[in-house]
Image (cartoon, rainbow, N blue to C red):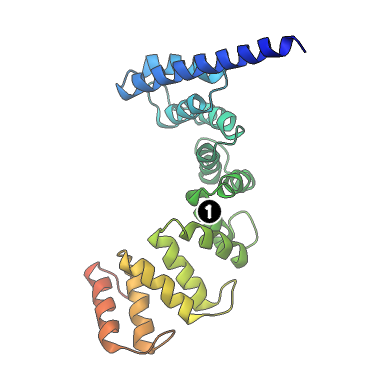
Amino acid sequence: MRLFPHFLFLLVSFSSIANDDFDKGKEAYKNNNYPQALTLFNKAAGQGSAKAQSYLGYMYTKGKGVKQDYNKAVDWYRKAAEQGNAKDQYNLAIIYEKGRGVAQNYNLAIEWHTKAAEQGNPRSQFHLALIYYNGKGVPQDYKQALKWYSKAAEDGNAGVQYSLGVMYENGQGVAQDYKQAFDWYTKAAEQGDAKAQYNLGLLYADGKGITADKEKATHWSKKAAEQGYSSKS
């Protein structure tokens, strides 16, 4: 038991050194001194710094100061991801989802997207929704897609809001609900989403989920058309 305070002191010391190396590495990175940044990040990463591991993953992904190497990127992202870093869980998932330099693997993509999504990462929530909606590597599951679109929509992304509108309008994974479709299309349309503007115009024209209003139907259809979107788009 007497060794515990000394052990704790060593842990704090190593953590302090790792943080110092990371901070210096980050400064070198900002100054485009990639060789120095790489050296310092490697030192910090070896001492367990998730932030340094994350930067190394990014440097190997983009080829910043090193030859682009997705296998090494995966190794570093995984180390950071295993420490619970949601951003790197997302980064790792994307590499597997897209098959960037590694074999495409939807099972691993879903595993890491789910870890990040459960921590509230909106990008992973969105990608999970897409995977389940399109049945990529898993059986198509509209209920799961709706669940993750709903969570991702909390971040205010217009594209996600539009997708939710589509699901409610078509009754995908949920009972058909024109009022909910109207609400989500409106949120997206007010942010400038052309597809949502077009669909909102149709709801006003047909009086679905809202009282029919030709003037508003024309307004939103015109907004969509101004962005080059029409029924043929």
Quarter holding the C terminus? bottom left
- Badge 1 density bin: few <14, some 14–19, many ≥20, Cα 10 Å: many
Q: Nearer the viewer, residue 136 or 19?
A: 19
Does the rendering let one see residue 227?
yes
The correct choice, above or below, for 221 with respect to 206 in the image is above
Quadrant in which residue 214 is drawn? bottom left
Describe the element under mark 1 as helix, strand or loop: helix
Quadrant housing residue 217: bottom left
The tally of labels here is 1
**Residue beneath the point at 25% across and 79% down:** 219
Residue 162 left/right relative to 127: left
- Can you give x and y, in whole percent of width and height, for residue 190 in the image? 31, 68
User: In percent of the image, x 48 and y 20: which residue is there?
Assistant: 19
Q: Amino acid at mark 1?
A: Gln
Q: Residue furthest right?
A: 1
The quadrant of the rendering that contains the N terminus is: top right
Quadrant in the rendering for residue 172:
bottom right
Q: Is residue 231 visible?
A: no
From the image, tell me which residue sits under label 1: 125
Q: Position of residue 179 (x, y in %)?
A: 46, 80
Taking the image as shown, residue 97 lies to the left or right of residue 223, namely: right
Give the image location of residue 138, x and y in percent: 64, 56
Q: Residue at x 37, y 76 (%)?
A: 199
Q: From what the image shows, is residue 213 above or below residue 112?
A: below
Residue furthest out toward the left: 226
Provide residue 88's location: percent of width, then percent of height.
Answer: 52, 37
